[in-house]
Amino acid sequence: MIALSTIFKYLSLIGSFAVVGNLLAMGFLLFDTHGKLSTSAQKLRTVLWISALTWTVGSIGTIVFTLATILDQPLSVALDSTILRSFITQITLGQYLLFQTIVALFVTLVSIRLNRILTVIFLLILTLIGLVAPIFQSHSASSGSHALAIGSLVIHVVALSFWIGGVITLAVLDPDDRPIAVPRYSELALWSAIAVVISGTVNAWARLDFKEAWGSAYSLVVLGKVALTVVLIAFGYLHRKNLSQRNSIDWKGFARLIFAESLVMVATVAMGAWLSSNQAPLRPERPKFDPALAVAGISSPPAPTWSRIFFSYEPDALMIGILITAVAIYVKGVMVLTKRGDKWPVGRTVSFALAIAAIDFATSGGLGLYAHFAFSYHMVSHMILGMIAPIGIVLGAPITLALRTLPQGRNVDERGVRGSLLAALHSKLAVFYTNPLVALAFFDGSLFVLYFTGLFGSLMQSHVGHLFMSIHFLLAGILFFHVVIGIDPNPRRVPHLVRIVILFAAMSIHAFFSVALMSSTTLIDAGYFASLKSPWLTDLLADQRIGGSIGWAMGEIPILIALVATFVSWVKDDSRETKRIDRNTARAAAMGQPDELATYNKYLQDLAQRDRNEP
């Protein structure tokens, strides 16, 4: 049973990695033709279809054999329609595996007719989400420090998919297309390899009991995987050494090296499939049952103090990975501008850096830790993520920086990464989301959906729920403040008066939400905070009302600041417009042309003269 389960997990992994590699090559590595797939990229559609079909078959088999393993029953029992339906609709692991299978099937169905670069990018994002979804209910999710274990494993798998999938795709590319794809992939492979090593080390440290692990079959497979990873890094070094000789690259030798590397990667994936099918020697459980550890994956912290809030740290590896990636890309962009001789305002960089620090504090810092255990601290975290950090991100102008530094097309027909971003910014979807009413609905309307429908209690029960809320708060805030005070390009121009009206509406709606929360006589967390049994939190309803008052106070101040900034911007724009008109008038006078006022007076005189001449 375990052997068959490992085989299907291997098919799922190798198929999904190949899908990622193919989509990566089609969307970023190979040429495009004005935003559409080039002939070289279209050749990969058949490979993509085979890879997606392999992923689909592997995912279906994984569902069945995972269920049989959990039940410890023959395969015939797992294939019973009632039992199988219950597993994929009522059990969280089954739901995630079903979601992964649906994504794989969707990619299979659309792969043959794939033609546009933006669609490829969308499929790549969807594939990565489907690939990592079951991780949130994997062995890592059942161990302590699960935010660190799960996040590091997600980063590990995503980095592996870029690294291994890219090599597999390079192996099947036509020899004429490799010189086009390899230089870009080389940079990505380097950072992917670094992420694989670091995330794998962090995950092993967070999960494994090293005293019990050594000498077991699990440890031997881990050591084998580490050895193969070292071999792959050596392959990467040889690739970069070969590519550094731009005038005399041995492409035939490179092809043989790629083929050998792909075989090593296939073996590495097989080891990973075996590791995911077997329970690791985990760190020993605490002798005393800890309800907080069982529910939230974090041991209940002591009563909050200022020092504990500011200096405690419970790392959420996935959020940290996202923030590090964002900072690395931003810094890279600033360095590109500096090397080019252009200047980037220091204030924008400082604003972006402070926003990143605030996000880390609200998710992994002491505030993020206590946000798991008390609604009041959750609301402070929510306000930082949804109100304060987005202002810093928006004032950092990341889209403007990207448009100035992203690579353009490598020939006259290629849209390139920068062109794809421009196309996305001017798409109908972007126009829809940047509508002020839509931005307001996401910003304030989602508060009522989240906190007054029972959704909040459900999301608080899992790490993926916490992650969803954090990302939602952040993106909703970024969208709203981008529309209102953003300095990045916007597909629609919003008049200042409309912005002010939207800000007043947001202030009123937010105040109404906070008052409703403060006036509530029932808990909205569906028993989540009570289940943690924190000894320092006794009155949950009072804490909920404190959270409502915090939301009111912290929510109004950023909106007031945005209101003042919008008014100042309005005055400055009017001043600039007045100066522009004055310059045009002076220029016209210098050229002997009448100004606008003189032209208008002449028009009125002509009308009066015509009235006098009429009988």
Image: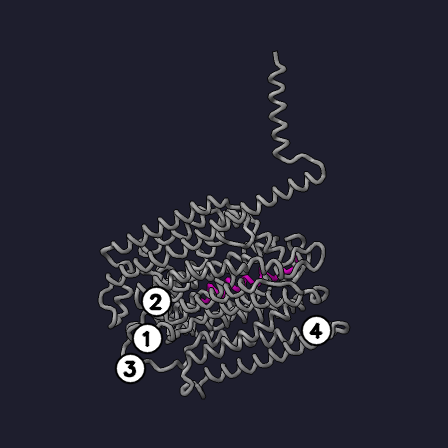
Residue at mark 3 to residue at mark 2: CA–CA distance: 26 Å
Front position in the image: 121 or 109: 121
Decide whether the magenta segment is chiefly helix, strand or loop: helix
Front position in the image: 67 or 74: 67
- The mark closer to the camera, 3 or 1, is 1
Name the quadrant of the C terminus: top right
Residue at mark 2 to residue at mark 1: CA–CA distance: 13 Å
Q: Can residue 295 be seen in this view?
A: yes
Q: Which amino acid does label 3 sit on?
A: Pro
Does residue 340 sit above or below 253 in this rendering? above
Tell me the residue at 60%/26% (across/down).
Answer: 604
Sequence-wise, the earlier of marks 4 and 2 is 4
Magenta region includes residue 374 = no
The label on residue 287 is 3
In the image, residue 357 lies at what x, y percent? Answer: 46, 68
Name the quadrant of the N terminus: bottom left
**Circle 2: element type:** loop
Q: Which residue lies under the disc numbered 1?
A: 299
Q: Which residue lies under the disc numbered 4?
A: 243
Tell me the residue at 64%/63% (across/down).
Answer: 342
Sequence-wise, the earlier of marks 3 and 2 is 3
Sequence-wise, the earlier of marks 2 and 1 is 1
The label on residue 371 is 2
Task: Verify CB contact (< 8 Å) between mark 1 and mark 4.
Answer: no
Residues rendered magenta in the picture? 42-62
Report which quarter residue 137 is drawn in. Answer: bottom left
Sequence-wise, the earlier of marks 4 and 3 is 4
